[in-house]
Structure formats: structure tokens, C-alpha cells
Image: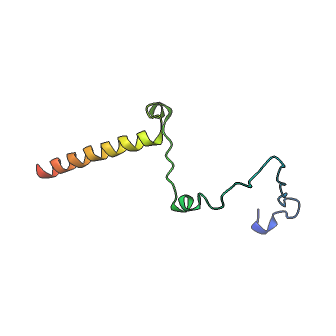
Amino acid sequence: MKLGAMKKGKDTPKVAEMRAEYDFSAGERGKYAKRFAEGTNIIILDPDVAELFPDSKTVNEVLRALSKIADRQRKIASRSK
């Protein structure tokens, strides 16, 4: 199939109307824009690992502790050479 051979016309997006029950009058424009711009790293944990950690704070604490242990092990290994 050639790139220019695609059909045009009928697949134009429909404009969604705002429902009456949606009320954004108290909303704050750009509230999360800075956080979004900084980016995030999403890591998917296997279910058995996810059961061990109740929240992201706990995951971060454990990874920081593990990082310190790994740093100490590297220093010990480099001294013994």
C-alpha cells in the first residue's frame, strides 16, 4: 500500500462536548505543569515484588539503602586489588 493511498474525509475526529456535571471553576491552570515538564520514570514491578512495597516512598528508601551497600562493597573491592 502506498502512503498517499490512504482514505481521507470520514475519519475526522469528533468534537466532544463538556458535560454539565463537570465543574472546573475551582481548578488551577498549570498546577502540575512543572512536574510534568521535569518528566517521570515509570517502573513496572512484578506482582510478587510489588506486594513487598506499600508505596513509592518505601521503594525509594530501600533502593537508597541498597545503593549505599553497593557503594561500600565497591570501595572494599577496589581496596583489596
Q: Please identify the quarter of the rendering in which residue 1 is found.
A: bottom right
Compared with 58, 10 (above or below) is below
- For this orientation, the residue located farthest to the bottom is 4
Say whether residue 65 is left or right of residue 79.
Answer: right
For the point 83% across and 49% down, the residue is 19
Say whether residue 1 is left or right of residue 43.
Answer: right
For the point 34% across and 46% down, the residue is 64
Q: Coloring scheme of the render?
A: rainbow
Residue 8 x %, y %: 85, 64
Residue 53 x %, y %: 44, 34
Q: Please identify the quarter of the rendering in which residue 3 is found.
A: bottom right
Q: Nearer the viewer, residue 6 or 52?
A: 52
Q: Please identify the quarter of the rendering in which residue 16 is found.
A: bottom right
Say whether residue 51 is left or right of residue 30.
Answer: left
Say whether residue 8 is left or right of residue 27.
Answer: right
Do we see residue 81 in this rendering? no
Do we see residue 60 in this rendering? yes
Q: Nearer the viewer, residue 66 or 74?
A: 66
Residue 78 x %, y %: 16, 52
Q: Nearer the viewer, residue 47 or 40?
A: 40
Compared with 9, 78 (above or below) is above
For the point 84% across and 54% down, the residue is 17
Residue 50 x %, y %: 48, 34
Total numbered labels: 0
Q: Nearer the viewer, residue 33 or 65?
A: 33
- For this orientation, the residue located farthest to the right is 10
